[in-house]
Amino acid sequence: MNTKFNKYHISLLLIITTLFSFTRVSNAMDTINTTQILRDGETMISNDGTFELGFFSPGNSNNRYVGIWYKKSTVRTVVWVANREIPLTNTSGLLKVIEPGLLVLQNEANVTIWSTHTSNFTARTPVAQLHDSGNLVVKDTNDDNSENFIWESFNYPTDTLLPGMKLGWNFITNLEVYMSSWKSNDDPATGDYSYHCEPSGYPQDVLKKDGVVQYKTGPWNGLRFSGVPNLRKNPIFSFDVVINKNEVYYHFELLNNSIISRFTMLPSGIAQRSTWIDRTQGWVVYITSPTDNCDIYRLCGVYGSCHIANSPVCGCLNRFIPKNQQGWDRADWSEGCVRKKPLNCSNGDAFLKYSGIKLPDTQHSWFNESMTLGQCKEMCTRNCSCMAYANLDISRGGNGCLLWFDDLVDIKELSAEGQDIYIRMASSEIILVMLCCYGNNHPDERHNEHLELLLFDLRTITKATENFSINNKLGEGGFGPVYKGLLEDGKEIAVKRLSRTSHQGVNEFKTEVICIAKLQHRNLVKLLGCCIQGEENMLVYEYMKNNSLDLILSDPMKSKLLDWPKRFHIINGIARGLMYLHQDSRLRIIHRDLKGSNILLDSDMNPKISDFGLARTFGGNETGAKTSHVVGTYGYMSPEYAVDGLFSVKSDVFSFGVIVLEMVSGKRNRGFSDREHHLNLLGHAWMLYREERSLELVDSYLGNSICTSEVLRSIHVGLLCVQQCPEDRPNMSSVVLMLSNEGVLPQAKQPGFFTGRNIINVETSVSSNATSSTNEISITLLEGR
């Protein structure tokens, strides 16, 4: 009997000892082991006191969950939930660690409702510990490797990304770490939205709703995600994307550990970074994504571009048109856009540069971190399936290669914060990506350089010109009408709009882009960019406030604005600009249509040579050529060109001489008349020169403003420039020297066309920023004799 009694008491003692071996957890502890239980009402606190783990009820719910929140925040902000799918219905829950290394949550019936899982590692002495980073880990307390975890909460986040967490993929374990929203503020169960780092192609972050893509950040570019311009270097946190053969992930780190900052996936589908402010005891939103409707994935379809300031927001990229125009007109952009001209790889495609955009979806892309942009282009050119290429990393001025092998989608216009991409186009569509100023006769001298021109969207130009309002029309020439425009940033522009019926205009358009795009001189008008969209072809120039020289001289009131110092300044400026074209630019450029209406004046009356649609370029020692098609303006055209089709730099010198005499006299060569004779302006000036009466040529409006020596020298130089024989005319460098020095000038010989014979009663006009006379037309097909 005593033996039975002793055995009974021994068994009871063992049971009691086992029960009491599970001790309560002190709230000051950050670790529990197999002998400890965490009950509802008890918590674990990280060593530095930043994070706390325990039981909680979210919002207005009575359900109980195990979670982690900020200890120091007066507003309980939960960053991780264990049993988010299976809540406890009362406060009888128990959290404990069991062998071989599991963390389990049990209800009042000792039924496990949530647990971790073990990896290949097991532990004889497992513990669960809450780190200062907010990471809850299970490890073997005897393992000397502090990072050797059996399980960690950082691998299984809920709606929050904390500093040090890796959002992405581990290819060795095939584990993806991603965020998922709560269902609501009262329910932490997995909601509709999830946030991932997508490794396919080239990494980008992706927001999904029920597994369907809603938003993509664009690819990582070394500084930020291409479509998140607000994600910049800042004093609060650093961020990066790590890419190697073992893993791909996005992460951020705090630059000051005293700051509390988190990245959260809200139940509404908004990804939001917020920072805790002690002074106000509240959270302040630092950045959100998506930010606007243009962040909706594929909103504008393939090759569509979204600009949130436009209405409608969707448009086609330049040189693309809507695939379904009727659908497009109804704001159904889903079918996107197609190239105006299909690709023809066998005949050789080319690439057009688009700037200031969020790079397209990179799911079907390829990348190389060491290639140059030139090597990137070469690889894309060789592969007909390659649709575009761009720099991979822009953090150090641009390096690496990114190629797209599918139609481009998810493009957003970001202006200055955007990037450059080169899109494959039919070679016939490439007008902008040309060689600068190289004639057709010199293919061996060409260099592969892209023009640095802005591509203006048609909607931008339409808005700037108030839909090409007649009130904004500056003039019209052989190319087409010219309009004044005002961009949103306040910059004034002049827009030359190619007439759709003008074959001449198409050729001039191409010539002007090729010739002027890379010319840089203070006395040449600056081409800002182009708009090539649908049937529209437009050139965009800096706006010249005072319009053209011709317009001012032909207006009795406006001509009074030009006293002699201003006129002499203009003469010298034209001479310097022409000298640059003839000998200082990369190749010799013969303008072939130099006249008053093609000299534009800025707000300070500085002259700018414009309108290079009829220009020709030459290399080496070439100075001229012969053509059967004479182009230009009678009254300014040299005799050897008008009669025999011979043009050279001396043809421009002749035109310059005419302009000089017009500037001095205030009269136009072709419209000049005198009661004493029937000579044109050149003949009249020559007659006065021979009779030493040159001062009688001076415009009466100049009054006492003239400097006699400068006026006489200008007339003399003008007559030297219009001499009959081109060999007798000085070159422009000599002209510049003669105008600025008081040396002795050679005697002028008889000018060309000085008799004023009626060759034709009209003049050409291809004006870029000036109102042209209604009787001026383009002459481009006159046969030389």
Image (cartoon, rainbow, N blue to C red):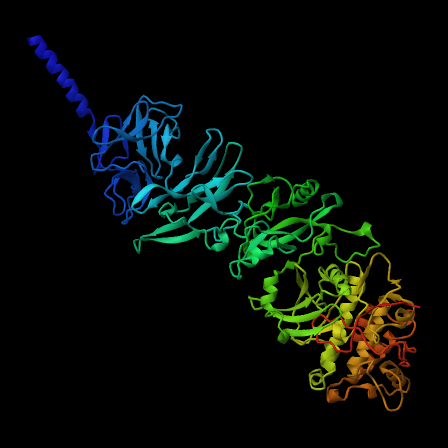
Q: Position of residue 60 (x, y in %)?
A: 25, 47
Q: Residue at x 23, y 43 (%)?
A: 62
Give the quarter of the figure containing the N terminus.
top left
In this view, 303 is above or below 37: below
Q: Quadrant of residue 495?
A: bottom right
Is there any visible trace of residue 173 in the rendered image? yes
Residue in front for this viewpoint, 325 or 782: 325
| Residue occupying the far front of the picture | 326
Q: Position of residue 61 (x, y in %)?
A: 25, 45
Residue in front for this viewpoint, 489 or 691: 489
Residue in front for this viewpoint, 256 or 451: 451
On the picture, is 730 further left or further right than 550? right
Q: Residue at x 76, y 89 (%)?
A: 700
| Residue occupying the far right of the picture | 785
In this view, 286 is above or below 379: below
Q: Quadrant of residue 694?
A: bottom right
